Amino acid sequence: MNDRPLDMVPGSRQRQLTVDDVTNQGRYLLNDFIHERLQNDGIENVPGMEVLQEPGTPRGPPMEHIREIGRAIRFIGDDLDKDQKIQELVSRVPPEAERQVILKVAANIFEDGIFNWGRVVALFYFAYKVCVKALDRIPLVRAIINLIVDFMRDHVVRWIIERGGWEAIREYFGSSKAQYGAVIGLGLLAIGGVFIYKKYL
């Protein structure tokens, strides 16, 4: 994909972000989300973040409010724990599923063309739930993460850039009503994901 710089939101003083910038930042945030969830869920022998990716994987430009961004992602992820339809979706996808199956389920999250931070984090959540089943096969975990990052780059990153980059999720975090609506809306899409999985497995 062309890595031409894209403008930040109007009035922003930050440097222009490229698709690669935001994708690499997203990879770091995804790895951080997976690593912290493993710890919080009481998983034994949690691999370090450096193990979840190949050596030398770029992190992208520094994010000024990295802690707040991570907190917002975790908060939305905690809400997804409460959505039974989403649990049904992710429980049906084994880590050994074909590449096309995982991509179809990921695409189903945005099936109706609506993008919001709740659904972006749901992509992270989906990746975590699949990866946690394969912790004894680190190369497979890395492959799943790479697949989700590739999907994010091709289908989600430009929306993130239009919002002003990952920093913009902090504004969303401040609106519990907006977040709740996004999570509920995502839950309604989960059933469709189950059918996609059955069809393409």
Image: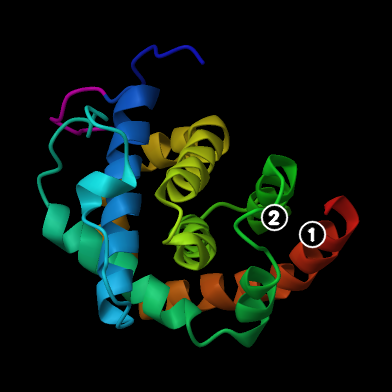
Residue 197 disc label: 1
Residue located farthest toward the right when viewing the structure as drawn: 199
Q: Quadrant of residue 172?
A: bottom left
Residue tagged by mark 2?
105
Q: Residues within 10 Å of mark 2 (few under 14, many from 20)?
A: many
Q: Are marks 1 and 2 in contact (CB under 8 Å)?
A: yes
Q: Position of residue 145 (x, y in %)?
A: 45, 46
Q: From what the image shows, is residue 81 above or below residue 155?
A: below
Q: Which residues are magenta?
A: 10-16
Residue at 35% x, 24% y: name it. 20
Which of disc 2 and disc 1 is earlier in sequence? 2
Residue at 39% x, 11% y: name it. 4
Residue at 51% x, 47% y: name it. 144
Q: Quadrant of residue 163?
A: top left
Residue 11 belongs to the span the image colors magenta: yes
Helix, strand or loop for disc 1: helix
Q: CA distance from mark 1 to mark 2?
A: 7 Å
Residue 21 belongs to the span the image colors magenta: no
Q: Is residue 9 visible?
A: no
Q: Position of residue 186 (x, y in %)?
A: 62, 69
Q: Nearer the viewer, residue 47 or 31?
A: 47
Helix, strand or loop for disc 2: helix
Q: Is residue 199 visible?
A: yes
Position of 17 with respect to 99 (left or right) is left
